Image (spheres, helix red, strand yellow):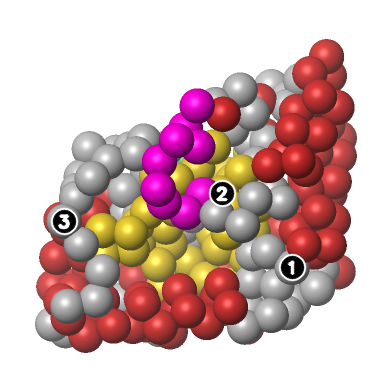
């Protein structure tokens, strides 16, 4: 069977037949000791005036590493104290970087889907964005998919009253990723759950996600 691709995790783990995209924040350079793929980015929670330039420089340097497949997670979060203007500055700088390097972007989005769609309209849409922990309705899902975005699902598939759960049934397999994001589920549990909800076999789900991985990370 094709590997289980975990498109977003903060902790390295070894799991039979899993392939990870391990997220690394500034000051987590020790994570680069593993033989796996990485994403690097300054998350909106960690945008602070004093360390901003230093951290952005670090992201710039690390993102040149060929094992770093994506810039992220970066994005917007409306339920934190970091001012919007500062989040926007960090996001825009890192978006420019991703476009310069032609690397996909892992998006963190809390209550900012509409603002991110505005950014998406102005961005180079040949470079895919992956919305990790996607949790919005199907209309937003379609708006994003139409703009060459992928949507990643994880533990919310176990929360039947979540927007993620309700949207999932209608998300095309060709726009789908799966993730653990340190939520306590194994990637196999997430794949099993997703295959069950889609009513398809584990191997055809893994094949679809594998095809998405190839398309997302090598087409541009
Ligand atoms: Zn995360």
- The answer to if 124 sits in the magenta stretch is no
Residue drawn at (50%, 42%) of the image: 23
Secondary structure under badge 3?
A: loop
Disc 1 residue crowd, few under 14, some 14–19, many 20+, Cα 10 Å: many
> Is residue 135 something one can see in this rendering?
no
Up the image or down, 77 lies above or below 45; here it is: below
Q: On the picture, is 30 further left or further right than 61?
A: left
Question: Residue 22: image x %, image y %?
Answer: 45, 45
Q: Are marks 2 and 3 in contact (CB under 8 Å)?
A: no
The residue beneath circle 2 is: 39
Residue 58 is tagged as none
Quadrant of the drawing holding the C terminus: bottom right
Q: On the picture, is 87 further left or further right than 77?
A: right
In the figure, residue 78 lies in which quadrant? top right
Q: Nearer the viewer, residue 108 or 9?
A: 9
Disc 2 residue crowd, few under 14, some 14–19, many 20+, Cα 10 Å: many
- Say whether mark 1 is within 8 Å of ligand 1: no
The residue beneath circle 1 is: 102
Q: Earlier in the sequence, mark 3 or mark 1?
A: 3
The residue beneath circle 3 is: 16
Q: Earlier in the sequence, mark 1 or mark 2?
A: 2
Q: Nearer the viewer, residue 162 or 54?
A: 54
Q: On the picture, is 58 further left or further right than 137?
A: right
Residue drawn at (41%, 51%) of the image: 36
Q: Which span of residues is magenta-colored?
A: 30-38
- The answer to if 37 sits in the magenta stretch is yes
Q: Are marks 1 and 2 in contact (CB under 8 Å)?
A: no
């Amino acid at each position: 069977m094709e590997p289980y691709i975990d498109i977003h995790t903060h902790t390295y783990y070894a799991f039979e037949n899993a392939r990870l995209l391990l997220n690394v924040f500034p000051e987590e350079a020790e994570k680069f000791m593993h033989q796996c793929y990485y994403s690097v980015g300054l998350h909106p929670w960690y945008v602070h005036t004093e360390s901003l330039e230093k951290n952005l420089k670090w992201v710039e340097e690390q993102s040149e590493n060929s094992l770093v497949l994506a810039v992220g997670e970066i994005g917007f979060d409306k339920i934190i104290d970091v001012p919007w203007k500062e989040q926007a500055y960090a996001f825009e700088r890192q978006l420019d970087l991703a476009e310069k390097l032609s690397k996909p972007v892992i998006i963190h989005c809390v209550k900012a889907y509409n603002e991110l769609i505005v950014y998406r309209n102005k961005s180079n849409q040949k470079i895919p964005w992956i919305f990790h922990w996607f949790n919005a309705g199907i209309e937003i899902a379609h708006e994003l998919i139409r703009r060459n975005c992928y949507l990643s699902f994880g533990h919310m598939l176990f929360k039947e009253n979540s927007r993620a759960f309700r949207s999932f049934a209608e998300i095309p397999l060709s726009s789908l990723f799966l993730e653990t994001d340190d939520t306590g589920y194994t990637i196999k549990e997430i794949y099993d759950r997703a295959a069950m909800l889609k009513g398809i076999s584990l191997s055809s789900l893994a094949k679809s996600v594998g095809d998405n991985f190839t398309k997302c990370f090598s087409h541009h």
